[in-house]
Image: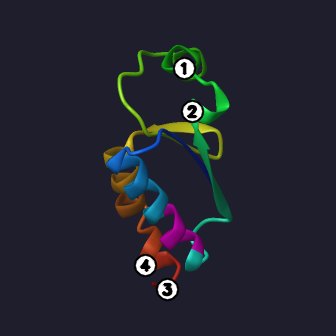
Amino acid sequence: MFVVIFGRPACPFCVRAQQLAERLESVDAIEGYRYVDIHQEGITKADLEKTIGKPVHTVPQIFIDQDHVGGFTEFDRYVRDHDLMAAAGA
């Protein structure tokens, strides 16, 4: 399972998403993750909307294995619902 996080600088939920992904990676619950700084990469919310297929109002926007999960809250819920930390022995 690979996680991609689209975020921006100084975004507290983006930081939390990165921290959660780092924890998951450290216990081998995911294969890895990539953080994409949308400002640095020149990606707009409109670009994300085209990929996701619905309006994007906030970041982070998170994908697991190319499937859109949502923001940090949805990512955290996904981890809990799929018991990823426990499944990895954390």
Q: Main secondary structure of the magenta part?
A: helix
Q: Earlier in the sequence, mark 4 or mark 1?
A: 1
Residue extending farthest to the bottom is 89
Give the percent coordinates (x, y) of residue 68: 52, 35
**What's the residue at 45%, 16% (across, down)?**
54
Measure the alpha-carbon separation of dots 4 and 2: 32 Å
Q: Nearer the viewer, residue 41 or 70?
A: 41
Residue 87 colored in magenta in the image = no
Circles 4 and 1, Cβ within 8 Å, touching? The answer is no
Circles 2 and 1, Cβ within 8 Å, touching? The answer is yes
User: Disc 2 residue type?
Assistant: Ile
Circles 4 and 3, Cβ within 8 Å, touching? The answer is yes
Q: Range of the magenta residues?
A: 21-25
User: Disc 3 residue type?
Assistant: Gly
User: Disc 1 residue type?
Assistant: Thr
Measure the alpha-carbon separation of dots 4 and 3: 5 Å
Q: Earlier in the sequence, mark 3 or mark 1?
A: 1
Q: Is residue 1 visible?
A: no
Q: Is residue 32 visible?
A: yes
Label at residue 86: 4
Q: Nearer the viewer, mark 3 or mark 2?
A: 2
Q: Nearer the viewer, mark 4 or mark 2?
A: 2
**What's the residue at 42%, 60% (across, down)?**
79
Q: Quadrant of residue 11?
A: top left
Secondary element under disc 3, as helix, strand or loop, is loop
Residue 23 colored in magenta in the image = yes
Label at residue 44: 1
Label at residue 38: 2
Measure the alpha-carbon separation of dots 4 and 1: 36 Å
Q: Earlier in the sequence, mark 4 or mark 2?
A: 2
Q: Nearer the viewer, mark 4 or mark 1?
A: 1
Residue carrying label 3: 89
